[in-house]
Image (cartoon, grey):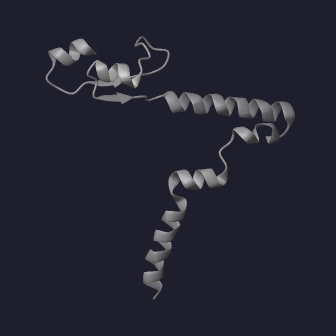
Amino acid sequence: FRDFARALPAPILANITEFGQTPLLTVQELAAAQVGMVLYPLSAFRAMNRAAQRTYEAIRRDGTQRGVLDQMQTRMELYESIGYFAYEERLDALYADKAA
């Protein structure tokens, strides 16, 4: 990456995918190599697939998802992460104006 940064007068983007040929450098190492942006296009996808696989294996084995509940995001955690309540408030305000 450093060689590209020296040779090209443009921002350098690193596309980091697991199990490829590019070593898994840290953000600090990439910054030191003058990389301006880093993409991790499949990291979460692969982790989600593994989690789904383990969940369905547990359901198949145990006949229930009880054994993996502690690994799941709760409804409240989901709502907090996506700002659900703020969205509901904006939606309520929008429709309250139209109903009046």
Residue 97 placement, left or right of 51: left
Q: Position of residue 100 (x, y in %)?
A: 45, 88
Q: Quadrant of residue 53?
A: top right
Name the residue: 15% across, 15% down.
7
Residue that appears at 74% across and 40% down: 70
If the image is split into quadrants, where does the N terminus sit? top left
Q: Closest to the observer: 42 or 36?
A: 36
As drawn, 19 above or below 58 = above
Name the one closer to the observer, 99 or 39: 39
Residue lying furthest right: 62
Q: Is residue 15 above or below residue 52?
A: above
For the point 48% across and 81% down, the residue is 96
Q: Is residue 83 left or right of residue 26?
A: right
Residue under the point 46% across and 76% down: 93
Q: Which residue, as the protein is rendered here, is positioned at the far bottom?
A: 100
Q: Which x, y percent locates residue 32?
A: 30, 20
